[in-house]
Every structure is written in structure tokens, then in C-alpha cells.
Image (cartoon, rainbow, N blue to C red):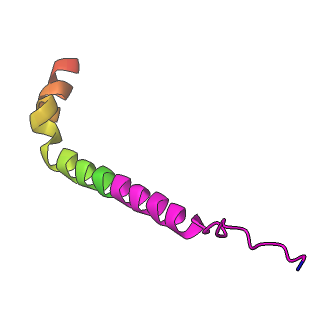
Amino acid sequence: MNETPLSPEAPKKNNTVLIVGIVVAVLLCCCCVAVGGSVWLWNNGDALLGSASNLIANIA
């Protein structure tokens, strides 16, 4: 009759997989934004900053 009662606390769940998944998803989103911004800047950079030939002509 001297039995110890079972503890009401359940064992903690391991959230390592969830945390790693969230970090990978955030890094993937950042890479997609960086690549998309780079492609846009590559295609529209001259219009954004003015023509590169005009800048070179003004310097020389």
C-alpha cells in the first residue's frame, strides 16, 4: 500500500524538428526574396539609377 502515485506531468515533447523546420523555411523565404530582388534589379537597375552610359559619359 506504499505505492507512489504516478506524476500527473506528461513528458515534454521534443520540438527540435519543429524549430529546425521553421528556421529552414525562414531562410528559404529570405533566399527567394534575395534572388527575386537581384533579378529585378538586374533587369531594372539602369532605369532605377539612370542609364549607366550617361553616368560614364558624365564622369569622363
Q: Residue at position x 22%, y 19% from top?
A: 59
> Toward the viewer: 54 or 9?
9
Q: 18 or 42: nearer the eye?
A: 18
Q: How far across and down, in percent of the image, does residue 31 sit?
A: 36, 56
Quadrant position of the N terminus in the picture: bottom right
From this viewpoint, which residue is outermost toward the right? Answer: 2
Q: Is residue 55 left or right of residue 3?
A: left
Q: Give the percent coordinates (x, y) of residue 41.
A: 20, 44
Measuring from the top left, give residue 53's x and y in whole percent. 14, 33
Check the image and report above or below for 13 versus 47.
below
- Relative placement, left or right, of 1 versus 52 is right
Number of numbered labels in the structure image: 0
User: What x and y, as percent, mark residue 50?
Assistant: 11, 29
Quadrant location of the C terminus?
A: top left
Please tell me which residue is depicted at 77% across the width and 72% down the height of the picture. 5
Task: Report the residue at 14% width, 38% height from top.
Answer: 46
Q: What segment carries the magenta color?
A: 2-31
The answer to which of 59 and 8 lies nearer the viewer is: 8
Q: Is residue 54 magenta?
A: no
Q: For residue 60, say whether it is visible.
A: no
Q: Residue furthest bottom?
A: 1
Q: Residue furthest top?
A: 59
In this orientation, does residue 49 appear? yes
Given residues 46 and 28, the one toward you in this image is 28
Q: Residue at x 20, y 27 (%)?
A: 56
| Residue 15 among magenta residues | yes
